[in-house]
Structures are given as structure tokens and as C-alpha cells.
Image (cartoon, coloured by chain):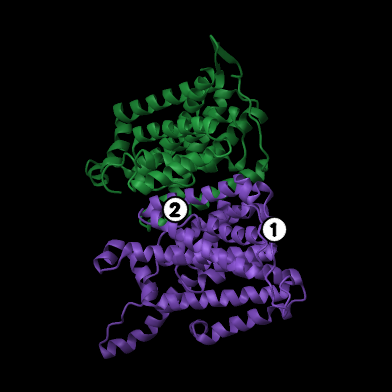
Amino acid sequence: MNLFFQQIMNGLTLGSIYGLVALGLTLVYGILHIPNFAHGALYMVGAFLSYFLMVDLGVHYWLAMAGSAAVVALLAILCERLVFHPLRNSPPIHDKIAAIGILLFLEAVVQMFWGADFRRMSSPFTGILNFDGLIIPEQRLLIVVGAFTLVAALQLFLRKTMVGATIIALAQSRDGAFLVGIDANRVAMMTFAISGALAAIAATLYAPINLVYPAMGHLVIMKAFVIIILGGMGSIPGAIVGGMIIGFAEAFGGFYISTAYKDIIAFGLLVLILSVRPQGLFAKGAH
Amino acid sequence: MYKFGSFLMTPLAKYLMLAFALVFPLLTSNEYQVYVMASAFVWAIAVYGLNIITGFCGQLNLAHGGFFAIGAYTLGLLSADYGWSFWPAFAAALLMTAVLGLLVGVVSLRLKEHYFAIFTLCVGFIIYLLMDKWEALTHGPIGVRDIAAPYGFGLVDFTDTVPFYYLVLAFLVFAIWFMGRLSRSLLGRTFVAIRNGDELAQSLGINLMRNKTLAFVLSTTYAGLAGALYAGMVRFIGPEEANITHTFDMITYLLVGGIGTLTGPLLGTVGIVWITQSLQFLEEYRMIIFGPLLVLLVIFFPRGVTGSFLGWMHRKGEQAQAPEQRSMGKVSLPSEVNSNA
């Protein structure tokens, strides 16, 4: 029973992190129709910035998270301005290649400063909560609560504020949004900023129970892509549900089937689903 | 300038390049340089494969490095673990990549655009994970040692660098020749039609699925050929051969040289391999330069060196011809070069 519960907790933790990363990816896709391969690099930069702020400058965990989120948001805006904006009228293959260029660049820069070593990042939440035999490490609880709070806040922002509504409007209909006078540039920059900040926060939440290294974004970004295909590209609830599906599949698959192959589960699932339903599980309309 | 340019487009320039490649081992006394050139040729073969599916057919295949590794592993495992000699294992490697390419292609090519790119990204990663984790078959992270060298039938010893260089060169020339035939054939034009607009192509009666699958199988076979040659050259391989960075490297070569062109893959690969070689200290950090280079290329020169050159020649040619044509009342036909995306 306890082991089973442990796997539920693992699934929730993984699902929360994947969901946050996939959310940023799906927001950008919904607005600009760019599969941002560089998103994983933003995640990785976020982890390294938090590491730098905490370990080298001695900043508190929360402040480090905020600082890293702000810097990565700026970085994401820069990517949009310098790279994706000039390419908005190019064939889609160019966006993808440019995103790969950003990814390679960011990884090389981080590796130049910090090297390719695996690093440990500590967090102030190292305790373990014990509910009558059910053991929950504090950091994992923090991840789940943090992710759910963020998603709720994002939903409020998108649904209840004017600025958030412009993002939804642009995602729903580009021409319609222009007709009512929405500034596409501003919305694009804002979307990139949100997606960058989400990636940095997810990385800072997850880093204390994982490791920090330049290639840490690879697996996460690929799984995030699997998730947004599962959940329908551009769909926000889809990203969260898809994140949970992959998180639980991995936690239980890793435990009951094979630890060595747990990373294959997500990709195997994708191959299987796309073979049967090329449009994804919950996709609406044509793509 | 224009005269020199038109010289470059004559067949003579091609033969001069071939002649240079043939005498290259005689020009340099340094065996290492011959080795570097041979490895550049191996990569160029793989990049030609990527050019078929991505350049001609317009589908960004991110599993290309994975198929390269499958070619290398098939040859490596058959020769090291099952005692096959080189050439049968070599043929098996080509067959293996073609069959797996067919399987993956049939499933993945039903997907369009981003879905295809993401799907192949995942396929590439599954290939990498299998090589890394399936220890019973692939030896896991230790990799495969003692891979057979190409058997020279008692005439030549391909363990030496120079004979191997000529072997690779022969395969490269064949690969380029085949590519040239392909690009001028109806099939090649069909691929370009699919890239320029698959709905339009379909309305012309082109069977999308069959042609895209054919392009995909051709491209994975090229990758398998390059991978098998690579395994025969370094004779020690590991799961890292399937790392996504190899695919990214190949995309860079292709894009710098000129995507969808005939000489682009060769120029891009050989050029960048030598630049990286001469900047050895950069090896680890080469992406600090090549990452932004990729971005700048797609923004400003999406057609790469060869494509930009062809475009420039075309414009110059039109300017030279314009006065004549006006007097003759002719309209110049848009040339094929302009349709290169």
C-alpha cells in the first residue's frame, strides 16, 4: 500500500513538472504555431540560474526562483524578437531549425560557464512529512502544490484579465484578434515571457530532487512535446492532463515494469497513439 | 565574377573537384588529414540522405542520426558478435536501415509538419535509449568493439587510411551521382512538388504517401550506408552515435551548404568539418558559433552557400539576357533554381 502510494506521489510530482513545461510550450504553439525546440534549453538555463544565484551568490531559494524566472522570461522575449519574429513569414521548417540553433547555442554557453558536470542543488525543504506511515518528502509536496497554484493563477490571468484575454483571443483567431485591435507583437512577447518563466520555475522546483547539467532539458522537452501532442497542440487543459498521464505512466511503468526503460514509456506511448490516431488524442479539428 | 561563376556551373568544375579529391592523399603527407577528409565524406553521404527527405521532400527528419547509428550498429554487431565478414554485414546494414526506414516511414509520414518532426525526434530518442539500455543485444554504454574492417579481397588493405579514403570516395561519388539522377528524374521533381505544396501535388495525381515513403527509405538507406562506413572506419562505436547532436550537426551542414541543392551537402559538410578541425580548441564549444550561425542562415540566407550562389547567378544571367529578350519580345521562364525554398 505504502509503495503504491509512493508511486502516486512520484506520478504527481513528475506530472506537475511535465505539465508546467508543456504548458509553456503549448501556449507558444497556440499563439505562433512554432514548436519551440529551444524550450528545453530555457528550462535548463532556468535551473542553472537558480543554481548560480543560490550556490554562488547565497540568495534564498524563493528569491533565486523569482530571479531565474525573470531572467529566463527576458531571454525568451529576446528569442521571440531576434529569431522568431523575423521568421514569421518563412516556411515552418525554418522556425524549427532556428529553434534548434537557439538550443545548441544556449547549451554550449552554459557548458562553457559551468562545464558538463552533474551538480546537486539543495533546497531549504529537505524534511520528510510522515502521515501515519505515508511518507512525503517536503520538496515533492512543494512541487505539486506549487504547480497547481501556478496553473490556477495562470487560468485566472488568462480568463479574468484583459491582458490574458488577448492571448486567448489571438490563439483562437488571428484575424479576429487583429480586427479588434490586439497588438500581436505584444501578445507574442508576453506569451514567450510566460512560457520562459514557467520553464524556469519548473526547473527550480524539480532541480533539488534531480541533478543540474547542460543536457537536462533534452528528455524533459521531448516529453513535453509528447504531452502537447497527447493533449492537443495549443490546448491548456490538454497540457495539464497530458502531463499527468505521462507522469503517472512513468512512475508506475518505472516501478512495475522496468526502471531502465521508464524513459521509453512516454515515447512508446506517443508512437502508439500517433500510429492509431495521427491527430492526437484530444485534438480538435484539423492541424 | 559572373564568368567565374558560370565556370563553376560547368561539368568541368565537377571533374576538377573530383580530381582534387583523387589526388588529395598525395598532396598531403599527413595521414591524419586524409582521415579527417574521409570522415567528412562519410558524413557527407549521410547529409545527402537528409537532403532527400528534408531538402527535396520538405519533411524535417530528426531521427536521421538514429538511422546512421542503426547502420553502424548492424554492421558492428554482426561482425563483432556473430562473426560475419565485412561485406555481407555491410549489405545487411543497408537492408536493415531500409526496412526500418520503411516501417518508421509508413507510420510517421501520415503526420504533417510539426507532428512529423516531433515524431521523428521521439523515434531518434527511442533508438538511442535502446542502444544504451538493451545490453543483451547492444552491449549498452560499453559499445561495440572489434568491428571488422572492409575486406579488400587480398588486393588492398582497408585498415590503412589511404585505401579506406578511396573506398569512401567511391561511395560518395556514387551517392552524389545517384542524387543527381534522382533530382533530374520525374521522381525527384515529384518530391519537390510535395515540398512546395502537398495539397497541390496531390491534386496533380501524386500519391503522397508512396512518394514520401520512398524518399524516406532512400534517405535512411543513405544514413545506413554512411553509418556502416563509419563503423568500418573507426571500428569502435557506442550509443553516442545515435545522439541527437549528430542529427543537429547534419542539419547544420545541410543548411550551410544549401538545403535542396546538389552540391550543398558536400560543400557544407567538408567546409564545416575542416573549419572545426582548424579550430580544435572549439570542439567543445563549436555550437556557440554554429547555433547563432544556424539562426542567421535561416533568417538571411535560407538557401545556404550553394542556393545563394545559384540565385545570384540566375539574377546575373537574367540581367545579361534582359536587353536581348526585350528586343525579341520573349518572356524569361522562371528557372527551377528560384523554387528552392
Which residue, as the protein is rendered here, is positioned at the far right? B29
Task: Measuring from the top left, give residue A281's x and y in whole percent.
Answer: 33, 40
Where is mark 1, residue-wise? B236
Where is mark 2, residue-wise? A96
Asked whether the viewer can see residue A83, the reply is yes
Provide the secondary structure element on which disc 1 rests: loop
Quadrant in the picture for residue B53:
bottom left
Which chain is home to disc 2? A
Task: Measuring from the top left, give residue B330's x and y in whole percent.
Answer: 27, 86
The chain drawn in green is: A
Decide if residue B90 is on the left or right side of residue B196: right
Q: Which of the pair A48/B18 is nearer the observer?
A: B18
Q: Which mark is residue B34?
A: none
Which chain is home to disc 1? B
Disc 1 to disc 2, C-alpha distance: 33 Å
Asked whether the viewer can see residue B293, the reply is no
Decide if residue B154 is on the left or right side of residue B337: right
Task: Measuring from the top left, give residue B11's x and y in whole percent.
Answer: 51, 86
Q: Which of the pair B164/B287 is nearer the observer?
A: B164
Task: Measuring from the top left, give residue A90's x and y in whole percent.
Answer: 38, 58
Query: Identity of the amino acid at label 1?
Result: Phe
